Image (cartoon, helix red, strand yellow):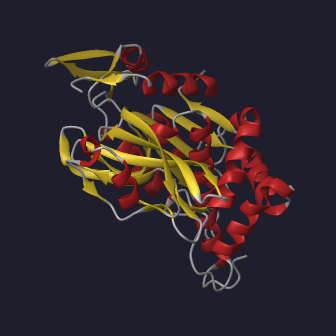
Amino acid sequence: MFMHTKDARKAAGRSLGTIVEIITFYFLRQWGVLDNISIERPLPEYGNPEITHNVEFTLHPVLYKTTLKVSLPITAKKIAKSLDDSWVGNVALKSNALLDNRGVLRNACLIAESDKELIVANLLSIDWNTKTAIIDVCKQSSRAYSMFECKRVGVEKGNKKGPQTIEKAKQGAYVALTSSSLQKVWNENGEKLGLIYMKGKPIVKPYEELLDDLIDQDELTDNLILSVGVVSNHGNWFTSDNQNKELKVLSESYDWLLFLTDDGFSKFITDLLLQPKAEYIAVKKAFEASYSDGKKMNVFTKTRIDYSAHVALCRYFKENIKDIEGWFNIIAPHGYNISGLHSILSKLSKKSVIGL
């Protein structure tokens, strides 16, 4: 697939990184938080908001939601015209297309934004006979309550371990440590404590205990960011049971660290790219179109994807979600399983935001 590129190993490595992101997005979608997702948003540092860091996915409270029927193709301008003035009066309209005239879908399509709000559209279904579509449009708070970062690092040719791995781990760890109002501190015994200011007063407790307390509150705690990392192996990260320094750095920094196993990764590639059933063949075609020699555009990313491939991926994740949940080992927090994260995300998605 990649022999036509200048460096086939690097090109293949980038595509594997894209697959990790796609798995994460459709995993979250199937978990029922699609309305809350934004992609590649700048996340501000807590207490230092002029510094921001782009992260793969952020989850935001939904302020309002509406369902629309629109004609194809689906542009931001067309969606805006179908919305009430109360939706679009104080926001800056984007030039994005939810579905363009080539059949390329933009997941979690940003329609418009302001300092406080995001308007995001998602495609639900298409009637090809009438050339119309049903879409959901959500007005999200610009303040996220969770972030997801994906980290995949390959081994460079001739090396047993790439020198960039610890630097990439540190980059991810820095964002996780600096974005939330719930801060991580360690005492002289190496125990991780949580520190948060509530009405100007500091509260200090064992970190996971304090995090659970905040999650159980009726409203979202202001600027609390539940940080989730998704990491994959391929020779550099060792395994979830045999952690090297990079994994230890990440596991101490993220609230949840999910290890995408090679077995799970291989299952995705086999089922959808190498030996797909007829109902999933569109995924393989989109991948080949995006990485073959002479490609016109990439239609196999977390953001932009061929619509037929999108439909096939949605079906695959819906039919196999229980097996897919088993693709991940939980490195942090210790002793938890993935259903615990699902429960937390479902709970957070239903909460209102203080002050809104």
Q: Relative to 165, is 289 above or below?
A: below
Is residue 174 at all visible to an observer of this figure?
A: no
Instruction: Quarter of the image for the N terminus: give it.
Output: bottom right
Is residue 325 at all visible to an observer of this figure?
A: yes
Counting the numbered discs, the total is 0
Query: Which percent across, then down, holds residue 8?
Result: 66, 78
Query: Which percent across, then down, holds residue 136?
Result: 48, 43
Which residue is at 44% across, 28% downward?
349
Q: Nearer the viewer, residue 71 or 49?
A: 71
* Residue at far front of view: 130
Which residue is at 55% across, 44% downward?
230
Instruction: Quarter of the image for the C terminus: give it.
Output: top left
Q: Relative to 334, is 235 above or below?
A: below
Q: Nearer the viewer, residue 66 or 282?
A: 66
Give left or right: position of 275 versus 160: right
Q: Relative to 333, is 102 above or below?
A: below
Which residue is at 53% across, 52% downward?
151
Give left or right: position of 43 versus 160: left
Query: Which percent across, then down, holds residue 6?
Result: 60, 85
Give left or right: position of 58 versus 294: left
Q: Quadrant of residue 195?
A: top left
Q: Relative to 202, is 332 above or below?
A: below
Query: Which percent across, then down, holds residue 345?
Result: 50, 28
Which residue is at 35% across, 46% downward?
83
